[in-house]
Image: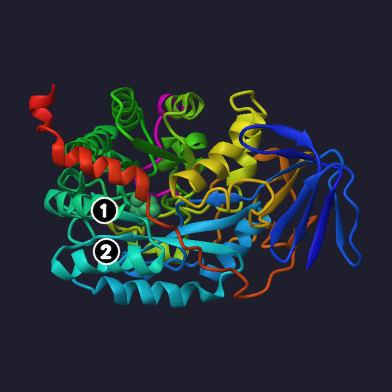
Amino acid sequence: MTVLIKGGTVVNAEQSFQADVLCQDGVITAVGKSLDTPKGATVVDAGGQYVMPGGIDPHTHMQLPFMGTVASEDFYTGTAAGLAGGTTMIIDFVIPNPQQNIMDAYRQWREWAEKSVSDYSFHVAVTWWDDTVYEDMGTLVRDHGVNSFKHFMAYKGAIMADDEILVNSFSRALELGAIPTVHAENGELVFRLQQELYDKGITGPEGHPLSRPPEVEGEAANRAIRIAEVLRVPLYVVHNSCRQSLEAITRARNEGQRVFGEVLAGHLLIDDSVYRDPDFEAAAAHVMSPPFRSKENQEALWHGLQSGNLQTTATDHCCFCADQKAAGKDDFRLIPNGTAGIENRMEVLWHHGVGTGRLTMNEFVKVTSTNAAQIFNIYPRKGCVSIGADADIVVWDPAASKTISAKTHHQNIDYNIFEGMTVTGCASHTISRGHVVYANGKLDVERGAGRYVDRPPFAPYYDALKIQAKQAEPVAVRR
Ligand code: URP
Ligand code: ZN
Ligand code: ZN
C-alpha cells in the first residue's frame, strides 16, 4: 500500500519542518517538499496539521490474568483503541506465575498477542529465580528480541520479587546487555498496612491509597536504584506516581547513574480524591497501583517530565470492568488493580502539556514516542518520521476538540478515568505499518496485522559497563 501524507508539518523530537511524507510497503520512503503522488496512492490531507511519529506506550497489560480475573481488554481491542488515539506500538509484559517456566509464559503471551492490530513487543517479568530462569533470560535476549526484564517489588504472595531476585536478575541483565525495570513499591509494607487498615474496619476503596503511601514507593525506588548502582546496571522505573520516587531518580541521575523514569497520563491528571467517592463502583474503578496521589505530587511529576528526569509517558493500560472490580466489594485488597488509558494518553498529554505550555510539540514527541524508542533500543525504526523508519505515524489536528467518554471510546471497559474531560488536539489519522487504520473517527483495522518487534541488546554501551564493573573497586570504597 502507498500513502502520501501531504501538506503537513513534520514534528520530530529534534525539529519541526514542512514536508510531505511518502509511505510504501510499510516504511517511510520519502520526506520532502511537494512530493509527487505515485499512481494509486492514498492521499492524506495534512494541511494545518502535525505529522508525528506514532505513539509508543511502553507499559500495557492486555488480557492479563491478575488477581483472580483476566483484564477485559485483549490484544485486538486494546491495540485498536491505541490506534484510535494515535498510539502505534505497545510494549506489554509477559508475567510468569512464580515457578512457571519463563519460556512457556513467553510463548503463551506471544500466542495471545497474534491478534494485535498494531506492532508490539514484550518486557518479561522475573517473578522467581533458579538456574532455568538465568538460562531463559539469555535465550530471550539472544533469540527472541527481549532487552528488558520487569520486577514487581509489590504484590507479596503473588508475583513479588524480593531483593535476592532483584540482585540475581539485575546482574544477569547486565551480562546480557538488557535493562531491568521495576514496579517500585515495598510489598512487605503494603501487606502490613493493608492488614492493619482492614483490621481497623477500613474495608472500602479508600483503604487502597492509605495502604500504599508515597514513602512505600520512594523506599522501593531508591532501593532498586541503589542495587542497580552497586551492580552498575542501568534501570528503568515504571509508573512513578510521587515526589519521593522522582527525587530518588533525580538524585541518581545527578550522580551520573543511568536511571530512567516513566510517568502515567493518569498520575499526571487524576488526584486521590477519587478514592473518597461514596459510590463503590466509581472509587473502585480508580484502584490501581501505585494509586493516584495528591495534587502536589501531580505537579512534581509534571516538573519531572519538563526537566527530563522522567523520560516516558505510558498508561499501564489494564482494564477491569465493574463486575470484576466488585470482587473487592467488602475488602479493598481484593479489588483487581488496574485502569485504562491507551486511547487517551496522547490527547490528554497534548491538551495538558502542549496546550498549557508545559511541553513543546517536540518534547511531546519525545515523551510519547522517541524516548521510549531510544531507551528500549528500537530507534530510529520507531519514534521518528524519517526515511527508512517504519511508517507508524499520527496526523494530529491541533484544532480538533472532543469530550472523552466511556460511551464513545473504543476501549473494552465500562469506565473512563478521564470521563468528561474536553481536550483540544487529537489524532485525525493514524498510519500503522503504512496503512491508514484510523481516519476521522473511524477505525479500519485488520486482526493480526500487528507484528512482533525485536529489540536488540545494548551491546557496545554495556560492554564498557561490564569492563568497568570488573575493574572497579566496591562502591563504598569508591566514594
Ligand atoms: O494497578 C496496576 N498497575 N495494575 C497492573 C499491574 C501493575 O502493577 O503494573
Ligand atoms: Zn505496576
Ligand atoms: Zn503495569
Q: How many residues crowd around disc 1 within 10 Å: few (fewer than 14), some, or many (20 or more)? A: many
Residue 33 vertical placement versus 360 (above, below): below
Residue 255 in view (yes/no) = yes
Q: Is residue 289 magenta?
A: yes
Disc 1 and disc 2 in contact, CB within 8 angstroms: yes
In this rendering, position of residue 394 left or right of residue 378? right
Name the residue tied to disc 1.
173
Residue 466 vertical placement versus 40 (above, below): above
In this rendering, position of residue 152 left or right of residue 442? left
Task: Please report the residue visible at 50 percent of the width from the left and 52 percent of the height from the top.
Answer: 378
Task: Please report the residue visible at 35 percent of the width from the left and 43 percent of the height from the top.
Answer: 461
| Helix, strand or loop under label 2 | helix
Image quadrant occupied by the C terminus: top left
The span shown in magenta is: 286-298
The chief SS type of the magenta part is loop
Task: Please report the residue visible at 30 percent of the width from the left and 69 percent of the height from the top.
Answer: 139
Q: Is residue 4 magenta?
A: no
Q: Can you give x and y, in whole percent of width and height, for residue 276 in the image? A: 41, 39
Image quadrant occupied by the N terminus: bottom right
First in sequence, mark 1 or 2: give its number: 2
Q: Can you give x and y, in whole percent of width and height, for residue 148 in the image? A: 35, 54
In this rendering, position of residue 370 left or right of residue 402? left
Examine the image and state in which quarter residue 22 appears. bottom right
Name the residue tied to disc 2.
137
| Helix, strand or loop under label 1 | helix
Q: Can you give x and y, in whole percent of width and height, for residue 23 in the image? A: 76, 58
